[in-house]
Image: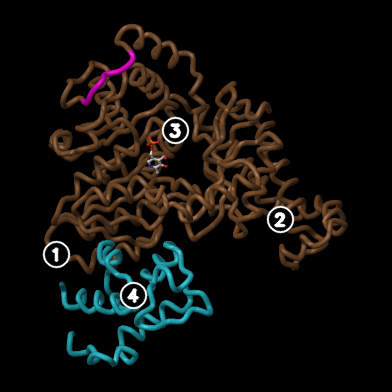
Chain colours: A brown, B cyan
Amino acid sequence: MAIFDKFKALNDVHEQLKSVGQSPSSLLFDEIISPTEAVLNGRRTILLGTNNYLGLTFDDASIEKGIEALRGQGTGTTGSRIANGSYDGHKELERELAEFYGMKDAILYSTGYMANLGAIGTLAGRDDYLLIDADSHASIHDACKLSDAQVIRFRHNDPVNLAKKLERLADKPGEKLIVIESIYSMLGDTSPLKEMIAVKNKYGASLLIDEAHSLGVMGANGRGLCELAGVEDEIEFVTGTFSKSIGTIGGFLISNVPGLDIVRLASRPYMFTASLPPSVVATARQALSRVPGATELRTKLWDNATQLYAGLKNAGFDLGPQVSPIVAIRMQNPQKAVALWNGLLEAGLYTNLALPPATPSGWFLLRSSISAAHSSQQIALAVELCTRIGRELGLIPCPLTQGASVEMMNVGTRRKEASEDTSIDKDEAMAQA
Amino acid sequence: MADKRSSAGNMLEDPVYLEIVQQLRPHAQATANISPDTIILTDLGMDSLAIMDFVFDLEDALDLTIPEHRISEVKSISDLVDAVYKLQEGA
Ligand SMILES: Cc1ncc(COP(=O)(O)O)c(C=O)c1O
């Protein structure tokens, strides 16, 4: 039908992906075995792309609390809190979130996506300015569309560029709200938070940070990058999600700014969608209560992240700039990126394939996210599979062809075999380097 | 500011136009033909990311911020020249 004509380019990409293998958007898991394993196309598969940072999706206590709430309060709230009222769990969870962050107030949203829509879209009004990082998550871009404020992008993680833009606004009335993320979801790089705050303070702006990927992951109590950097007092707004380390679904906005409550009545993504069901609230509360004490899980998570990052780096892959629970292999060749992702799936390893324009600088990414529930054997296997298939595809350099281009290495299988034989030396050399 | 602007028909000598072309070159396809009528989104082999990077470079070169809504209004290079002059005039 003509109404779908505008999606032709999108459809072509999708069809092309399907023609060479699986399509990331149509994978169907036969069975979920644990936080780190599933059955996919009849094959037992390691999950290395589910943002399940603390591995709490099968936590017994969370499941029990969820079942209890299901039986006690039913399957859903069937409406928004503005129209249908709140359940005690909503209020309790908001109180617990505020307490956890040591901030005054919290507002629950039904997802992290909606928390960003609701927070950013509402806080910045007609005469205000939104200053957003160029690599912002889609929810932040969409929030900008919902806001009447003027939207200005600054270069990714670049406080100098941000400062220039604020400087040019210096004599303009209107609030300036800077929006950044703690860990950027594609490459796993973190925000230079202290520098960003210095700029914010200099120009009298406010700062909202999306801690989606750092909740439970960073900081001694798992409060995220702001805790780790020791700057929690200097942040006006935090948004986050339960869909990653908390292992369920839901989002939130936290603030120390007095009077946050009024946002509920002005925030359409709060008012016009159903509130979280009681069972989800109960599982989120249980998982959140574990976060401050989950030091061992955090240690294991970072050990796993370091193991994966070092293993892939030593194999010669081009990775994101720092060790993080998100580890991304950067590629320029789309065919090889797709082939790597498919090859790994066939070998029993599930990762994420991320394509431009959802990726920074037009990279084709094999994105993996690590869990505290992964064993070091699983991580070692992941490194081994990536290395083997990466070599087969000529994605990683080998000693015999050092200095030659990746394309050249792909010429002729004999040459590939030869280079594989000696590639261990290269690994060792790189490990020592 | 407006007086800096070249008279109509003389776009090829307009300082803002020339700056835009200079900043576009590294981002556009090598073979791309750049003229005032060039449609930025479709004629230069640039995707949305390349356009964003180009805008950052242009902002630095002109010491000016181009807000999102202004970028989305622009189609051709001469639209962008107009947008820049308007922004310089504080509109
Ligand atoms: C940075 C960031 N913010 C927000 C979200 C949205 O979270 P949710 O899955 O809860 O909608 C995500 C996850 O996709 C994210 O990566």
Q: Which residue is mark 3?
A: A244
Magenta stretch in the rendered image: A75-80
Q: Quadrant of ligand 1?
A: top left
Subunit under mark 2: A
Do tags 1 and 4 sit on the same chain? no
Q: Is residue A302 visible?
A: no
Do tags 2 and 3 sit on the same chain? yes
User: Magenta span: helix, strand or loop, mainly?
Assistant: loop
Do tags 2 and 1 sit on the same chain? yes
Residue A78, magenta (yes or no):
yes
Q: Which residue is mark 2?
A: A396
* Secondary structure at numbered mark 2: loop
Q: CA distance from mark 2 to mark 1?
A: 51 Å
Q: Which residue is mark 1?
A: A172
A110 lies above or below A165: above
Instruction: Indicate which label's residue lies in the foreground, 4 or 2.
Output: 4
Q: Is residue A251 visible?
A: yes
